[in-house]
Image (cartoon, coloured by chain):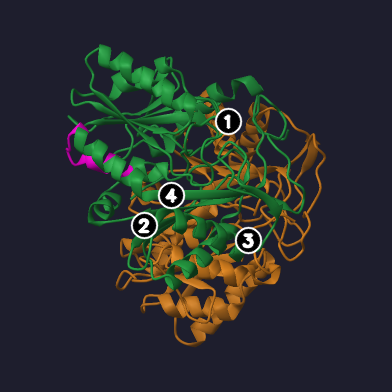
Chain colours: A orange, B green
Amino acid sequence: MKKVINQPNNVIEDMVKGMALANEAQWQRIEGTNVIRRKELSPGKVGIVSGGGSGHEPAHAGYVGKGMLDAAVVGEVFTSPTPDQIFEAIKAVDQGNGVLLVVKNYTGDVLNFEMAGELAEAEGIRVEQVVVSDDIAVKDSDNTIGRRGVAGTVFVHKTAGAKAEQGASLDEVKASAEKTITQVRSMGMALSPCIVPDAGKPSFHLEEDEMEIGIGIHGEAGTERKKIASAQEIAEELTNHILEDSGLSAGDEVVVMINGMGSTPEMELFIVNGHVNDLLNEKNISIHDTYVGEFMTSLEMAGFSITLLKVDTEIKQLLAEASEAVAFRV
Amino acid sequence: MKKVINQPNNVIEDMVKGMALANEAQWQRIEGTNVIRRKELSPGKVGIVSGGGSGHEPAHAGYVGKGMLDAAVVGEVFTSPTPDQIFEAIKAVDQGNGVLLVVKNYTGDVLNFEMAGELAEAEGIRVEQVVVSDDIAVKDSDNTIGRRGVAGTVFVHKTAGAKAEQGASLDEVKASAEKTITQVRSMGMALSPCIVPDAGKPSFHLEEDEMEIGIGIHGEAGTERKKIASAQEIAEELTNHILEDSGLSAGDEVVVMINGMGSTPEMELFIVNGHVNDLLNEKNISIHDTYVGEFMTSLEMAGFSITLLKVDTEIKQLLAEASEAVAFRV
């Protein structure tokens, strides 16, 4: 295992410490927790909390900032944060108008966020929860009932955050988040595995000429393992799966995200973007905007995912609102 | 070689195509070239052009945008762009008040940018050039006379770009860029090599327990190859080298950049940041701001670099000015 770390069992404490120091003007670590919160909240706003296992940076702390999340709860590597930590985040950002929890669909996360929500409601804080399940590759997995939540989650952070910043009620913010969830689809692939520091060895093995299609952001099994194809073939295969599943068709308008899984050079992401663009043009699906970069990673896994978000006037407006989140500045 | 590409000899064409489509509101490819330029220039402004070999993305196209570069010239992988391409960029962004070229110190880049500047001057365009040489690891190398230009270049883009946006003259913009160059120092390390697509094999070899200190962004030899140390030890070693070289001392104020080389998880960069912070605090050097992420990569090389920029009132103001560049939004 080649990593720039100290003790493998201390990576989260070391990371959260360095994180809080990286963006001091905006971020604040809630003392005694692994929660990164906005230093100053927008007064009276509905709170937005997300989080999950770490190893997906910049998710989710990178999305904490005016216009997106108010707090991100950092779990151990690929492990849900505990309910007490999530509860601390909820208490810190509630301003009397309730808190929306944005959760990626993994069994541990869903249970722990739900439990934290119940703890908060017992103290009189109104809490609602939305669950993102944008990964169309597989239905159910080792750690999921239903589809997994992956890079599309970032768009949910953005639309919910913008809606809350506009002064909307908790129900309205939840409705915008749910609309985004309904309209977003993703699918990924990998060329090489990641290494969880505590495990010290790769999470799976691929031969030198193999790739895995449909892989999850923790290296969970995908739909097919086969010989590496060209960028064009891979991009078209993933995009076509998303188009079939979503029912997107000529005349629809989408936002595209090409997300690197951790060690894929941006050069390759741009190459993929060109092919996704060509295919969507061919099908007369218009592209409102494109995001290329690392948004939801899987430690040092090589690979990428494609996300398509179908947009309407409301979603376009919410995406265009200002965001001060360090990993998604608008 | 595991890469998401098509033909290895076509990666630049494929990338530049996908790049131009990724950020259409702001970027425009100059037809028939590998130059990414701002779609709309700020009227009357001094032009700022940079570029170099590709494989360092987001450098340099990611820094094209209002408040930073007006154009970036994209060379083949790790290969200087040709003078004619640079000349096209200069012509496209000159508005009668001259153009500053920001060049990383590699022999090929310096020669080709100089030659392009001469072509432009022959057509009556005033051109000045600054050369960034922030890498303190080695003096001279296979492809450099003097020190190499690495991640500190991004700060030169930022200060020169902000100064130009304020309406400063070419001489004033050049002076701000040169001050930044004088005050910035970097040093890097690697855990694993990168693979140039056309070569198809790793650029060097490190044993499973080895790292290389002082490596360059093309995998050029560093100062020492040794057993992997802890994040704290590596962070302190690099920071101490920079402090010794720069003469920074108690009471000075710096901006810190922790730059990932391509496949280093952000988790590890944050861990390094914590240790750099501790060491600077210990020495009573105050930290004005911190940037953690991928700013100047080396394809899929694993490793990172530390950059310290000594700041004064002028540099702090220039860093704080708005930037719309996709990889450095302020």
Residue ID for mark 1: B142
* Closer mark to the observer between disc 2 and disc 4: 4
How far apart marks 4 and 3 lie (CA) works out to: 44 Å
In magenta, the rendered stretch is B158-170
Residue ID for mark 3: A105
Q: What chain does badge 1 belong to?
A: B
Q: Secondary structure at mark 2?
A: loop
Q: Are marks 4 and 3 on the same chain?
A: no
Whichever of callouts 1 and 4 sits on the residue coming sooner in the sequence is 1
Q: Secondary structure at mark 3?
A: loop
Q: What chain does badge 3 belong to?
A: A
**Mark 4 residue type:** Arg
Residue ID for mark 2: A324
Q: Are marks 1 and 4 on the same chain?
A: yes
Q: What chain does badge 4 belong to?
A: B
Residue ID for mark 4: B185
**10 Å neighbourhood of mark 2: few (<14), some, or many (≥20)?**
some
Q: Position of residue B67 (x, y in %)?
A: 28, 41
Looking at the image, which residue sits at the far top?
B122
**10 Å neighbourhood of mark 3: few (<14), some, or many (≥20)?**
many
